Amino acid sequence: MTASPIAIVGAGIAGLAAARRLADAGRSVVVFDKGRGLGGRMATRRADGFAFDHGAQFFRVRGEAMGAALSAWREAGAAGAWFEDAFVGTPGMTAPARALAAGLDVRTECAVTGLSKDGAGWTLSDAAGPVAHPANGTFGAVVLAVPSPQAIPLAASAGVAMPALADAVYAPCWALMLGFPGPLPGVKDRIEPDDRAVAWVARNASKPGRGEGESIVVHARPDWSRAQLERDAATIPALLSVPLAGLGIDIHAARYVAAHRWRYALVETPAGTPFLADPAGLYACGDWCLGGRVEAAFDSGHAAAGAVLAEAAR
């Protein structure tokens, strides 16, 4: 008998790692994501001839599972070394996500808002009702690979209690993207200033496979971002102009200026478990399980997929 398809909600690294492991084991998988692209915070924005890695800046690999994936990515030209043991996607941070998603059924711009289960299987719904997909209503399991605050209402909609979801705590981050007409003399490739507002500055041109111009990405500190969280994005550049001027970066000389708010950027307190599972066939995974690293997200998704396979084998 053919095994039931698996639904994965979230096309970030956790969700795609889970999908890849399941697909490689022969399972039918459908991935749903509310966004237009893949990778979650492994993101690159292109605008006005510039490219900005405005989410995760790099990743490190310590374990066997992601180590094998990294080897494949490097061989395919989807990742490269930036400094020391730090790696980036090439030519953008979304490249590893696209490699994981190769050959998978991925439905973007589909915001799943509810879950239900009957004798035939799981049904996913959006704001208009059941999601339009041939497999909907027959999913044998659902993997929630979204930030824990987003997973809580989805689990509740299915009548499933996962108390550990509330144990994870995220910090937000305002990311500032600055595109300049030419190089900025004296600005280092990576800066971690001792400043109450600015946590990190990176020159994208210093990363392998780039070369799209002088693209600067600035990440604000968690406490500062939390205090400014509900501000309009258009007000953020001016608030960061003074500390950046002290680093040799004049916002007023930029040809492109934009800010992006990451509500769930940095895991301050992880749940402390590789994934969560309910006997009804609902699983939850993400970097919120093990810690705020790309590899933590990958390992969580990989582990959740392993649990799905183990349950099916019983």
Image: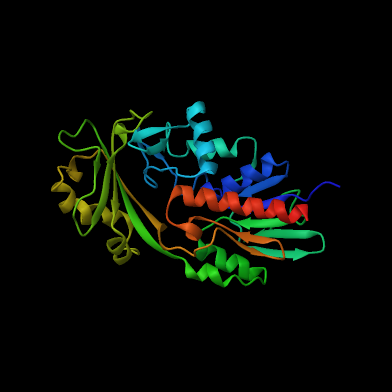
Give the left or right position of residue 297, taking residue 170 as reference. right
Give the left or right position of residue 190, taking residue 159 as reference. left
Q: What colouring does the structure picture have?
A: rainbow
| Image x and y of residue 193, in percent | 20, 50
| Image x and y of residue 166, in percent | 50, 70
Which residue is at a point 64% across and 69% down the rendered structure image? 157
Asked if residue 205 is positioned above or below residue 302 in the image, the reply reads above
Give the left or right position of residue 222, taking residue 241 as reference. right
The total number of labels drawn is: 0
Which residue is at a point 27% across and 62% down the rendered structure image? 224
Q: For the C terminus, which image quadrant?
A: bottom right
| Image x and y of residue 47, in percent | 37, 37
Give the left or right position of residue 269, taking residue 309 as reference. left
Asked if residue 180 is positioned above or below residue 271 in the image, the reply reads above
Which residue is at a point 37% across and 60% down the rendered structure image? 172
Q: Is residue 90 visible?
A: yes
Q: Where on the picture, by quarter, is residue 83?
A: top left
Q: Residue furthest right?
A: 1
Q: Is residue 128 visible?
A: no
